[in-house]
Every structure is written in structure tokens, then in C-alpha cells.
Image (cartoon, rainbow, N blue to C red):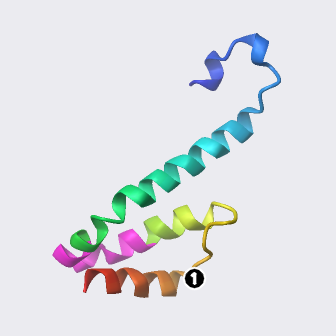
Amino acid sequence: MWLDRMPPSVSSADSGAALDMYRTMEDWRGITMTTETVPRFISEDPNRLEHWVDWYDTRLSRNPEPWPDIPKDELRTILRGWAE
């Protein structure tokens, strides 16, 4: 919506790059904000482990360097360890 409302004087703005940066910032914010609560969520309901594995995998895999490239099995092990 913001990009639709940009004035024509900013026509040189790269809307794709702006959206990519916004998504990257939102992913980083989301990971940072949930890191404290995810161990408790998984401990309370171990069936939610796969949801959080998928959630982290999506955010880490769609962002370029310097984000870590963690295989899904390793990510599952890490999150399981957080909850123990």
C-alpha cells in the first residue's frame, strides 16, 4: 500500500528492493521477538515443534547472507534443545 501512494517525484525508487528490505527487517524482528518465547511454547505443547521449525526455516532460508544457512533437521534439533 505504501508503494502505491508514493508520489511520482520518487519514480526512481526501486519498489522491489524496498519490499525486500522491509521483509528482511520484519523477519529479523520476528526472529528476535520470538526467540525468548519459543522455548516456553514448545515446552508447553511439544506438538508445536514442527510449526516453529517451519517458521524459522522459512525466515532463515529466504534471506541472503549473513543469515545462517541451517538445515531443517539441525534447526529441529536446536529448537528441541531450547525447550528441554
| Above or below: residue 26 compared with residue 78 | above
- Pick the front one: 50 or 31: 31
Could you tell me which residue is drawn at 50 percent across and 86 percent down? 74
Asked if residue 35 is positioned above or below residue 17 in the image, the reply reads below
Quarter residue 16 falls in: top right
Q: Check disc 1 and report the residue beneath it.
A: 71
Q: How many C-alpha atoms fall within 10 Å of the one at disc 1: few (<14), some, or many (≥20)? A: few
Q: Where is residue 66 shown, x and y percent of the image?
A: 66, 66
Q: Which residues are magenta?
A: 42-53
Quarter of the image containing the N terminus? top right
Q: Position of residue 21 (x, y in %)?
A: 64, 44
User: Toward which corner of the image does residue 44 lie, by quadrant?
Assistant: bottom left
Identity of the residue drawn at 77% across and 27% down = 13
How many marks do you count on the picture? 1
Residue 15 vs 63, above or below: the answer is above
- Seen in the image, is 4 located left or right of residue 30? right
Examine the structure image and report whether residue 68 is included in the region drawn in magenta: no
Q: Secondary structure at mark 1?
A: loop
Q: Main secondary structure of the magenta part?
A: helix
Residue furthest to the right in view is 12
Q: In percent of the image, x 42 and y 59: which residue is there?
A: 32
Direction from residue 44 to residue 69 in the image, left or right: right
Quarter that holds the C terminus: bottom left
Residue at the spot x=62%, y=16% of the render?
A: 5
Label 1 amino acid?
Pro
**Which residue occupies the foreground of this view, 46 or 17?**
17
Residue 41, given in percent of the width and then of the height, sits at 23, 69
Q: Nearer the viewer, residue 1 or 12?
A: 12
- Say if the magenta span includes residue 46: yes
